[in-house]
Amino acid sequence: MQTKYVVILGSLMSGLGKGVVTSSLLKIFDFYDYKALPIKFDGYLNFDSGTMNPFQHGEVFVLDDKSEVDMDFGIYERFLGRSLTGDLSITGGKLFGSIISKERHGSYLGETVQIIPHVTDQIIKSVEKVAAEKKPHVMVIEVGGTVGDIENSYFIEAMRQLALKHEVVFINLTYLPTLDVVGEQKTKPAQIGFRLLLQDGIRASFIICRSSSKLLDSTKEKLALFANLTKDRIIDDQDQATLYNLPLHFMDIGFDRLLLKDLGLKSDRLNLPKVSEWNSNVEKTVRPKGEVNIAIVGKYTHLKDSYASVKESVIHAALKHDVRANIDWVESSDFEKKSDFERINNADAVIVTGGFGKRGTEGMINIIEHARREKIPYLGLCLGMQLMAVEYARNVAGLKDANSAEFKPDAKNRIIVLLDSQKRITDKGGTMRLGAQECVLTDTQSIAYRSYRSKRISERHRHRYEFNNQYLELLKKNGLKITGMTPDRSLVEFIEWKDSFGIGTQSHPELKSRFENPSPLFLSLIGAAKERRKSKSN
């Protein structure tokens, strides 16, 4: 069976949730036991998102194969429940880098290299190559940016050309504002976005309307009239109680059957047990029996997308424990000077996240110390593990000037140092210790082992600095537990407190958490949070 394509384009504004819509369609195809894969295009000229500030672009998502990709890949994986690969990510930087490299090597001798046909041909070949190698029934292509942007115009043209060769269904995601003074859902902006697509030679088969309230029939009729579509092709995408309900919502309104029909796919193969299990998890997320308070401490909390995977991992684990996780986003810079820890005391568990640079790290250390002393369940991720080691060295082992070489290169006691493999590297992009890395859990009584129930595990990484093994024995002598190391025992991967629930990992376990299969560490943390909450209420 030849691969079929769905192309999703956004109009009017960014941030409408193309990633969630794409993921929902992927899940719908999965419900029907069709193999579906995403491709994401990002117009920026960076090779990937690895060197971009989280404030600008949200979190950098890392795949098993070491690829640093857009955060939407995290949404895809969380919905699909399986790992993806870096060849599904296409950026402007990759495209133009490839074109220039070919030109320099003489691949276009005698030709004037142009956007059309050379760049557009390269896009189509990239898409077709993935389809030929992975053989999905459907590829869902998310076009980053907004219709009308210069940055994605050549990619949109490539999608138009793709439709000349293959079966392609185009979907336009748009926004319907409701003005308070009028109380009416306004369709004019959506009409303009649709016409912009028509000017590019693309006629969308569906318009998905993002809105804060249910799409009115009168609004559907008006938009359908001006878009020359039937009313059932104007799709309601109102706010959901949880984003994981969107594929079920699309199916409730019959969008799935229309889409399958357009693609020439059978609609009589719905896997009801899959749908039922997903629906059950959604119900538990929306109507939990209890609650816990989780403090997420970070350096970029003003943009929640910087920690999207951490947030979703908490939600996944809370679902399995049948509780709602009330998240308190704590900016670490606010705790640079020890002050009132009431917010931390109110938490049933604390997570200190990853990050780069010195800003806010002393605040993180202060919070870690308070959590340790008050025996508040604690999980440190990457930097959160490193600073957990620094705090322990300072306040338990007595090394008052203990620090990380990243923040104080001349410190006498550098508990965290640059990886040996990083010392001769000057390039920044794609050069860290990245992707899936194996770890051996050395203590069967540890939090780590009880969480994973296996001695050998694999998690994704993204870091340049490591625990300094020169301090290994000193910190162990003072009670810090080293519970996981690389198979060659060269790098520390897990550390734990001896007297309470406190664990730090050099990895990013949040990157592998799934809606139906939560991260083991987050499951253990939420379990400990439930116990603390129960003990406080007794």
Image: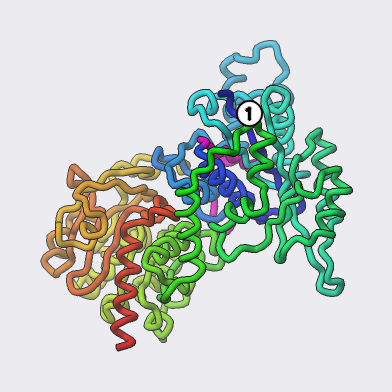
Query: Quick one: 81 or 510, which is closer to the camera?
Result: 81
Task: Classify 10 Å Cα crowding around label 1: few (below 14), some (14-19), many (20 and above).
Answer: many
Query: Where's residue 135, x and y in %?
Result: 51, 27
- Tell me the amino acid under the disc marked 1: Ile
Q: Where's the C terminus, which quadrant?
A: bottom left
Query: Where's residue 420, x and y in %?
Result: 28, 44
In the picture as drawn, the residue positioned furthest to the bottom comes out as 538
Residue 295 visible, this angle:
no
Tell me if residue 48 is in the magenta stretch.
yes
Up the image or down, 234 lies above or below 95; here it is below
Q: Is residue 120 left or right of residue 70?
A: right
Q: Where's the N terminus, which quadrant?
A: top right
Please tell me which residue is depicted at 50% across the width and 64% down the height of the picture. 283
Please tell me which residue is depicted at 36% across the width and 73% down the height of the picture. 349
Element type at marker 1?
A: helix
Tell me if residue 55 is in the magenta stretch.
yes
Residue 167 found in image quarter? top right
Residue 73 visible, this angle:
yes
What segment carries the magenta color?
34-56
Q: Is residue 114 left or right of residue 132?
A: right
Q: Is residue 194 left or right of residue 412?
A: right
Query: Quick one: 537 or 19, which is closer to the camera?
Result: 537
Query: Quick one: 326 or 438, which is closer to the camera?
Result: 326
Query: Where's residue 416, x and y in %?
Result: 28, 58
Up the image or down, 252 lies above or below 535; here it is above
In the picture as drawn, the residue positioned furthest to the front comes out as 268
The residue at which mark 1 appears reads as 123
Please tell me which residue is depicted at 81% across the width and 63% down the height of the picture. 185
Q: How many marks?
A: 1
Please tell me which residue is depicted at 36% across the width and 48% down the height of the picture. 461
Query: Where's residue 405, x and y in %?
Result: 32, 58
